[in-house]
Image (cartoon, helix red, strand yellow):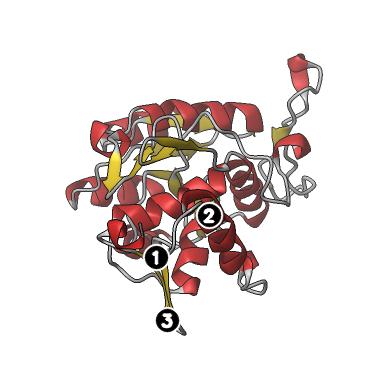
Amino acid sequence: MGSAGADGGRSQKIHLGDDAGVPGAVYDSANCPNAIGALHREATALRILVVEDEAAIARAVRLNLIGEGHAVDVVADGLAALTWAETYPYDLAILDVILPGLDGLSVCGRLRASGFKSPILILTALDGVEDRVAGLDRGADDYLVKPFAASELRARVRALGRRIGPDRMALITVGDLELDPASLGVTRAGRKIRLTAREFALLELLARHPGQLFTQDRLIEALWNADFVAESNIVEVYVHSLRRKIDAGRRASMIENVRGSGYRIRADPTLGA
Ligand code: CA
């Protein structure tokens, strides 16, 4: 199952692990940077919930999506997924069908019943026609058949990302700072500022909640991944870089550091003019 196939191996497959001991998942290494630099700039970073109990697949999916600049949480249990989806504002949920706790189709139905509006992508088995039909009937937007190519996963996620409502893509304005989530464009008092995708994601999170304090852990959780918790100065490094770019020539920064507590964007950033 899941050989590189007709595409001549250009895009490797994510393998479905099974009892026969299929080797661990593989992924397109070119698109899975372990550094944060090489992120795509075309797409807005999404916050994605991946519900998958097979560790190798979960890891491959996560790495691919992180490689696209998204923030990804992986949960292995269907019931836990419902809790996570209530807790965080996900832009997309990717659900495996066979899960401990609660199966993916039921998770899908319960999410929709509880008002979850973001796109849902179901991962199904090759022979899972009924699962695909049931998933779509219960409110899923799309499905992907295992084993799938990493490039197809990324393309489906991009396509679903484009469906996300105009609200999320609307301009975000805080004082004289303006962010365009659709293009990742940023201006301050009309001056264009170039940010990396991750810098943009950090600024976007703060700017969507002016005045709200975000702890370092919360920012790491939202924008990076638990893997980075060990290197906890990553937030400091990014805030430093953001300030250098957005506050150039100003006396005070619009990103406030509340010592020992976290960061917030000033609700009235003109104070820092
Ligand atoms: Ca499963």
Q: Is residue 13 left or right of residue 176?
A: right
Q: Residues within 10 Å of mark 2 (few under 14, many from 20)?
A: many
Residue at mark 3 to residue at mark 2: CA–CA distance: 19 Å
Q: Secondary structure at mark 2?
A: helix
Residue type beneath disc 2:
Leu
Screen quadrant of the C terminus = bottom left
Residue type beneath disc 1:
Ala
Name the residue: 54% across, 38% down. 194
Name the residue: 29% across, 62% down. 271
Q: Secondary structure at mark 3?
A: loop
Marks 3, 2: nearer the viewer:
2
- The reply to whether dot 3 and dot 2 touch (C-beta < 8 Å) is no
**Residue, disc 2:** 242
Name the residue: 33% across, 28% down. 163
Residues 223 and 102: in front is: 223
Q: Residues within 10 Å of mark 1 (few under 14, many from 20)?
A: some
Where is residue 253 drawn, in percent x and y? 43, 62
Where is residue 243 drawn, in percent x and y? 51, 58
**Residue, disc 1:** 80
Label 3 lies in ligand 1 vicinity (Cβ under 8 Å)? no
